Amino acid sequence: MQPSMFNVRVPLEGRDEVFLMNTFTDAQLIVSREVSDFLDRLAHDAHPSLTDDERAALATLTENGFIVESRDTDRQNVREFFHSVREGQEQLRLTVLTTLQCNFACGYCFQGDHGDYNKHAAKMTMETAERVAQWAEERLDTLKPESFALTFFGGEPLLNLPVMYFLAERLWASSQARGVRMLVNIITNGLLLTPEVVDRMAPYGLNGVKITLDGDRDMHNKMRPLRGGQGTFDKIVNNVRQVAGKCRISIGGNFDEESVETYPALLDFLREQEFADKLTRVAFKPVIRARSAPRVPDAAPKPGGKFIALTALGAGAKPLNGTCMTSAGGGTSICDNCNFIDDKMAFLREETMKRGFATVDGVHMGPCEIHRKHAHTIGPDGALYACPGFTGDARMSTGHIDGRQEAWRQSAASRFDALAAWQQCDDCAFIPVCAGGCTVAAHTELGDLNAPNCHKSSFEAGLVTLARQAAAASASTN
Ligand code: SF4
Ligand code: SF4
């Protein structure tokens, strides 16, 4: 008998108590210092003589997973956990990039309406969309999942409405016919998000729309302008105003060292809006950019200057080769759970919570979808990828919806099948919620898909936030 390696704890300020969490069972307790000390004693003495109080504490701690038989038990549990995440068939997840074209000219992204990019950027044809639908139906028939999560992404997905409407309608009918619950999400820059689009999608499982605002009005307009430099903030906010209440809206944002200071003003602005209580989540993350990339269009590069040193995804000046940088490689990113800058993330999380918005807690961040065998990303040409963060690199394609057999794709697929960076993380307590970090970042920064990409201090900062919340909740019930 010994304390689990997945126990984490935070002493509560001004109280003789400790917040205890087990990241494997997700149990969270506030205990006295004696109980916390008792756990320490158990670490050194597996068979101590116990008082009645200690026996009672032992029973509660064991029941919640804070005490396990041995370190081998922990390791076996986590192996089985990742296996069940990988093989889980309850949900089929599909992210479809309807196009790599974009109507924005974001300074940190070298895609969008820069130069003649959009003339050549890929866009899914109706023929490919038809094959995507057939492929998804075959997956539904094979897997027989309880639910089907379909996400539209890009580029800017709303620049290819015919494909989005076709896939939503067709796959809604396919899901209904099979008794599968379908949920549709859209990740968009918000410029074309009209009530007509939402009304058209609503009958086909529209669950949520994620929109990006990069700081307050002035900062956003500088970071995410149209090609002519026109601001987009007012138009996006007006669109949100018109569709809030019709569907779930979450707000994301990409910050850097300079723009992070404007986010409290953005949060104040959002709080004042009549749609504030209709926002289901507000969560920000750092922008990903090549280190030599200019901050705003036409600005001179400032190597080593104002940039937060983050992963440059892809080579040269095309960080994601057309995949929208608002989401890939970061968080729920589509994921919001990687490449975060620890202290800034903690600052923005607290500012967001202070204003009463739901946000990510910084601990429950994974495992992300790359660890799920039945989560797929499909590029505009029908190529399959393990996650949206790899769509900018065709060599990382794991297959194709037309079933073509190519050795290089099969080899990539086998490498993703065998992912287990966490196995190099020794006895880190955050393995169940981190799984070794973002694979895209590991591949790009370290040249190794299977190397841990560690942001442990960010999990530790998230834990402090969780502890404060638990302390506040317990104080209000006492
Ligand atoms: S590997 Fe990174 S980019 Fe891909 S889903 Fe996971 S956290 Fe997101
Ligand atoms: S990458 Fe870091 S935080 Fe994540 S499991 Fe490994 S050691 Fe822990």
Image: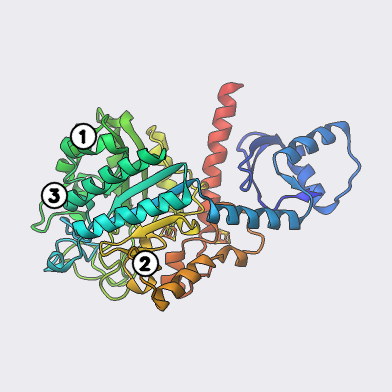
Mark 2: which secondary structure? loop
- Front residue of 285/219: it is 285
Q: Nearer the viewer, mark 2 or mark 3?
A: 2
Q: Which amino acid does label 1 sit on?
A: Asp
Q: Position of residue 155 (x, y in %)?
A: 23, 58
Dot 2 or dot 1: first in sequence order is: 1
Residue appearing at x 24%, y 45% in the figure: 216
* Location of residue 63 by image quarter: top right
Mark 3: which secondary structure? loop
Residue linked to disc 1: 199
Residue appearing at x 21%, y 34% in the figure: 199
- Front residue of 440/316: it is 440
Residue appearing at x 42%, y 65% in the figure: 440
Q: Where is residue 377 in the image (x, y as percent from the top left)?
A: 36, 58
Residue linked to disc 2: 403
Where ligand 1 lies, by image quadrant? Answer: bottom left
Q: Are marks 2 and 3 in contact (CB under 8 Å)?
A: no
Residue linked to disc 3: 231
* Left or right of 347, for residue 236: left
Q: Do the residues labelled 1 and 3 touch (CB within 8 Å)?
A: no
* Location of residue 223 by image quarter: bottom left
Q: Position of residue 373 (x, y in %)?
A: 48, 58
